[in-house]
Image (spheres, helix red, strand yellow):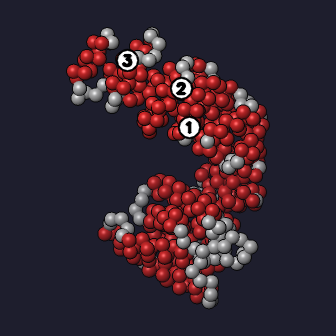
């Protein structure tokens, strides 16, 4: 097992077993499981040895009686859980020996197929001396090992153990992940499962789980994904819209989702709702495009004929998404594609984030940026941001601005941000620039 997979699973299992608050645990589970799935796919790891046509999976041994192997794994797994419960009372991070033990257990878990996992879950349920929280974590992890490659099997196992999963948490994530994977291949099948089970598991088939279905549907049939928002009764449509936009993994998928979005908006009558939905989706596009890079991103934008309102939303989404090394290019793009009055706050947001992350790189870009309104806007935010720790540098940049109210306002901000441990320099700066 590669350490990148193991590390992700380690975070997942320890978070499930130890006393992490529910909302924090859910965040850790989602992030760790996503990393696990992505890394495993890259390495050709599958979870079902009964399908030889699938990519080769990791397994310790496929020999011997499957039922005996599963029961032996259950004994080992339960003993490990008891060990973790005792360890939890002592506190502290896992030492090297226990980390190695965790990885061995997880490798053993990933060697089991769905039938064996069902046996293991039965044994875990019968281990009455385990804490309910521990039992939930073990069973939830067992089911999640199937969710990526065999979501229907994962959901079938889940329904047999659903009494252990109350409220939003691991149970909701298991459903959400399984539905998302199922919907990628069979959105109507996944939808049918939701229709049949929403009333049966109202605490678990939540909006979060339904968004998993919508997200999985989006890459294959974005038009249906938008329709499902209303059919499934999603309370916060903006989150569902964002999940649809995030489902685009290629420029072609993004183009298809954009076309479906515009068709969806055309059927709405409330203008504010249309703006909110459009903003949520386009900003999400900007997040993914910013990570892909300027060349590919700007090429897609040029081919998409974004409206002025869509361009503005896109620029909003770039404020924290663009690669630091390309922030300058995106700043110049905004200055060239948005009216000055619309571009200013977008530029300021990017420059502010960039300066806080790498003020030297931002300053280097400023020295070579072409003169004009875009550069002046960037200088103002740069100077205001660095003034808290390098006020002299900020002042030098402020003085490159054209004389007038923008320069005066920037100088006043620098004075207000001047470090309090140098009152003499601060007072001298005030006198020099006649700051009132």
Quarter the N terminus occupies:
bottom right
The label nearer to you, 3 versus 1, is 1
**Where's residue 38, x and y in %?**
60, 59
Pick the residue in front: 380 or 13: 380
**Which residue in the structure is indicated by mark 1?**
326
Q: How far apart are marks 2 and 3 (CA)?
A: 21 Å
Q: Is residue 37 visible?
A: no
The image quadrant that residue 261 belongs to is: top right
Q: Nearer the viewer, residue 210 or 326?
A: 326
Alpha carbon distance from label 3 to label 1? 28 Å
Q: How crowded is mark 2: few (under 14 residues within 10 Å), some or many (20 or more)?
A: some
Q: Residue furthest front?
A: 368
Residue at image coords 58%, 36%: 317
Mark 3, residue position: 411
> How packed is label 3: few (under 14 Cα within 10 Å), some, or many (20 or more)?
many
| Image quadrant assignment for residue 160 | bottom right
Which residue: 74% across, 35% down?
304
Secondary structure beneath dot 2 equals loop
Residue at image location 55% in from the left, 84% down from the top:
71
């Amino acid at each position: 097992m590669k350490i990148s997979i193991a590390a992700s699973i380690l975070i997942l299992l320890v978070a499930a077993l130890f006393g992490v608050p529910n909302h924090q645990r859910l965040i850790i589970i989602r992030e760790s499981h996503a990393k696990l799935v992505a890394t495993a796919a890259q390495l050709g790891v599958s979870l079902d040895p009964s399908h030889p046509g699938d990519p080769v999976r990791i397994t310790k041994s496929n020999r011997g009686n499957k039922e005996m192997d599963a029961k032996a794994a259950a004994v080992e797994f339960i003993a490990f859980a008891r060990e973790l419960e005792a360890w939890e009372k002592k506190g502290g991070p896992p030492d090297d020996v226990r980390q190695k033990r965790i990885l061995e257990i997880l490798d053993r878990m990933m060697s089991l197929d769905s039938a064996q996992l069902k046996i293991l879950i039965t044994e875990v349920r019968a281990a009455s001396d385990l804490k309910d929280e521990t039992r939930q974590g073990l069973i939830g992890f067992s089911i999640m090992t199937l969710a990526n490659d065999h979501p229907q099997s994962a959901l079938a196992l889940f329904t047999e153990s659903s009494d252990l999963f109350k409220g939003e948490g691991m149970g909701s994530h298991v459903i959400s992940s399984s539905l998302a994977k199922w919907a990628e291949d069979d959105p109507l099948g996944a939808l049918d499962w939701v229709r049949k089970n929403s009333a049966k598991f109202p605490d678990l088939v939540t909006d979060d789980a339904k968004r998993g279905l919508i997200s999985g549907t989006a890459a294959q049939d974005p038009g249906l994904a938008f329709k499902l928002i209303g059919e499934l009764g999603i309370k916060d449509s903006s989150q569902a819209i964002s999940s649809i936009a995030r489902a685009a993994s290629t420029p072609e998928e993004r183009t298809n989702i954009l076309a479906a979005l515009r068709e969806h908006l055309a059927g709405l009558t409330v203008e504010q709702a249309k703006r909110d939905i459009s903003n949520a989706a386009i900003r999400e596009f900007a997040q993914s495009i910013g990570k892909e890079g300027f060349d590919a991103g700007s090429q897609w934008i040029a081919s998409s004929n974004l409206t002025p309102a869509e361009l503005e939303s896109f620029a909003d989404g770039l404020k924290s998404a663009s690669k630091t090394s390309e922030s300058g290019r995106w700043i110049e793009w905004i200055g060239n594609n948005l009216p000055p009055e619309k571009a200013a706050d977008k530029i300021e947001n990017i420059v502010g984030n960039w300066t806080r992350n790498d003020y030297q790189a931002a300053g280097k870009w400023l020295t070579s940026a072409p003169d004009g309104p875009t550069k002046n806007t960037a200088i103002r935010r740069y100077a205001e941001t660095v003034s808290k720790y390098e006020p002299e540098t900020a002042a030098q940049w402020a003085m490159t601005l054209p004389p007038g109210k923008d320069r005066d306002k920037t100088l006043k901000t620098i004075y207000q941000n001047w470090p309090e441990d140098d009152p003499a320099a601060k007072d001298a700066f005030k006198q020099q620039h006649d700051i009132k």
